[in-house]
Image (tube, rainbow, N blue to C red):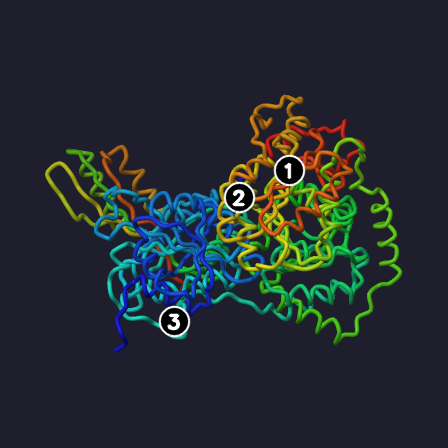
Amino acid sequence: MSELMTGAEIVLKALQEQGVEHIFGYPGGAVLPIYDALYQQEAVQHILVRHEQGATHAAEGYARSTGKPGVVLVTSGPGATNAVTGLTDALMDSIPMVCITGQVPTHLIGNDAFQEADTVGITRPCTKHNYLVQSVEDLPRIMHEAFHVATSGRPGPVVIDLPKDVQFAKGAYMAKAAVRHKTYHPQVKGDMAAITAAVDLIASAKKPIFYTGGGVINSGPQASQLLREFVRLTGFPITSTLMGLGSYPASDRQWLGMLGMHGTYEANMAMHDCDVMINIGARFDDRITGRVDAFSPHSKKIHIDIDPSSINKTIMVDLGIVGDCAHVLEDMIRVYKSRAIQPDKPALEKWWQQIEGWRGVNCLAYEQSTDVIKPQYAVQRLYELTKDRNSFITTEVGQHQMWAAQFYQFEQPNRWMTSGGLGTMGYGIPAAVGVQVAHPDALVIDIAGEASALMTMQELSTAVQYRLPIKIFILNNEYMGMVRQWQELLHGGRYSQSYSEALPDFVKLAEAYGAVGIRAQKPEELDDAIMQMIEAPGPVIFDCVVSKSENCYPMIPSGAAHNEMILGSDAPQVNVSDEGRVLV
Amino acid sequence: MTVENYSSHTIAVLVDNEVGVLAGVIGLFSGRGYNIDSLAVAEVDGQSHMSRITIVTRGTPMVIEQIKAQLGRLVPVHRVVDLTIETESVERELALIKVVGTGENRVEALRLSEAFRARVIDATPGSFVFELTGRKEKLDAFIELMRPLGLKEVSRTGVVAISRGPNPL
């Protein structure tokens, strides 16, 4: 008979056994026993955030930059409901997370008790799975299962709702090794017949393209290595979604840049005109496809995804392969090599010529200015001055996010943390906190907009408390820029509620938090100011005052196809169909 | 999307009988905008605490494929089987039907119930409760016949189904 422990002690012991070193949380009445157990040990360090949403995004940043699950601890009721945005964000972007929520004692559940919320009911659609722990006997199994579910297959957030009486109740601990999940064992190896058929299709391709996504990153660094090997072996062009940036080096000649709504002209045109599309770990999101019935009309499509429900969801494919990217890529490379396949060189050469023509359009060109800082220029300078450092980039959501994706060049996976699926403004500051906790010596920069940054600005206080030297690089145009852009293009320039009035003085705001504030207003002062930011030992808010009405191009307007992209130069002639106007 | 390529599918889902599984299945259908025409659920193995959910749904082949994949993603789900296309199967539904009336209507209702092999499980001088088992269409037909004869209330189980032949799913 093993020694009995309290539920709270079981939680801590399970976290330790799972190798958890950091958790992000905020205490409250319904989790006090766990905070008490936390106080009496040193293996798990707790990072106190300023709002529970911040805890979830910090855990996401931590997870995305390390490949390990992010762990969150919040109280019942408002603690749990405040965590919902981050849980949904993690679900949409497939981020492994375990979130422990306190709950009122079991005998009060359903009584509308103080700080009671139906947490499992509320979080069911925004988690991969959730548990209400009804007895301390179930607790060790559920703790270990939660980590298994969160991290295997397509990763995602798991909630463990833990009533306060269960935290006090005594029970026996059960080791990780003794727990085997009854149902959840996702397939990681792809079907060999399908892989062989895919290699045949790849061998016959004349105008191929690799279209890769966040699945490659989630599969681990090995998947990125295998992807690089396979892409170089074939000589094919490659593009990636927002979530997949970094899995293939942006400096490489075969890299076409990001695709999709604000992707490059060459990537989108190549997607439209290709004859074989190899989708690895991406999900044909609406930001990528544009008009579905006009999406890459002449191609045979191969789709590798660990989630069977992603295959044939919006785009019918010719070959679906369910499996983990690294496993499938490994098998594909082996089959490809064993057959001594020679790609169709003349056809590929012609295809590359066509692509170079599109590249020649120089779709990311913008008009430079000598008196105001252009936001694109700001990101370019930031990239040039930080590229040789150990840097990690997070973002908020909007124009600045797209400029960061277009102009910051990623060479490695797990260096780019952004809210893709849910598009959560306020993600970047807490995500940067999480990244910096995991990588204390790295340069962690949140490329932000002034509106997004204000949504979770309070997490700067967390950064100051734990001496996390995050840099909040705000492209300040005094507008919710993407909203303003759409209002200009779709709503006759009626800028309804998109102007950021009464902004704080960001330099003074930084100082009020005990951080450093830096402002740059002219192009010529930008480089020095960025260097000052990099060299500052603590957290910094960088108020980069940029041109106010810059639009983000190129752009596939809503409801349009890839080959109907608009470039910055033909912006005034934008026409959006009535069908397109209802889309987001 | 045209209505023509819609088809009806009966899907069996084997799940762990734990808290929230049914809510997860139903939430999936409402959250993603799928149809549920009928739903039946009960524990089928007390020892292993397994429940079987039988869902009748409609959609295009792409939607049906998506529904099955989404069900398969739910963590407590053991298996998802499309009884309409993966195997030959038999389907049954049970209905309890209350008919109130006297005189000619009462006699006619009883006569029709015999023709349909319904059982009378409750009777008063002015009412019957019939129990009828069969395919959904048979139940629909009987209920329509009862309507002019004093139909007052219907309770149906929803369709349950099982594969033909000696092999389990």
* Helix, strand or loop under label 1: strand
Q: Which mark is residue B2?
A: none
Residue A15 placement (x, y as % from top left) = 41, 65
In terms of sequence position, does the residue under pointer 2 or pointer 1 come before the other?
2
Q: Name the residue under label 1.
A: A543
Q: Is residue A536 above or below residue A304?
A: above
Q: Residue at x 85, y 54 (%)?
A: A352
**Image position of B97 (left or right of A174):** left
Q: Which chain carries label 1?
A: A
Question: Comparing marks 3 and 2, which lies closer to the viewer?
Answer: 2
* Helix, strand or loop under label 3: loop
Residue B6 visible within the image: yes
Residue A296 placement (x, y as % from top left) = 72, 47
Q: In which quarter of the image is residue A335?
A: bottom right
Q: Which residue is drawn at 88% across and 52% down?
A: A353
Quarter of the image containing the N terminus of chain A?
A: bottom left
Q: In this view, does B118 lie above or below B151?
A: below
In terms of sequence position, does the residue under pointer 3 or pointer 2 come before the other?
3
User: Residue flagged by tag 1: what amino acid is it?
Assistant: Asp
Q: Mark 2 points at which residue?
A: A514
**Image position of A122 (left or right of B106):** right
Q: In the displayed image of the protein, which residue is found farthest to the left?
A: B125
Q: Residue A179 carries which label?
A: 3
* Helix, strand or loop under label 2: loop
Judge by depth and name the residue closer to the eye, B65 or A74: A74
Q: Are marks 2 and 1 in contact (CB under 8 Å)?
A: no
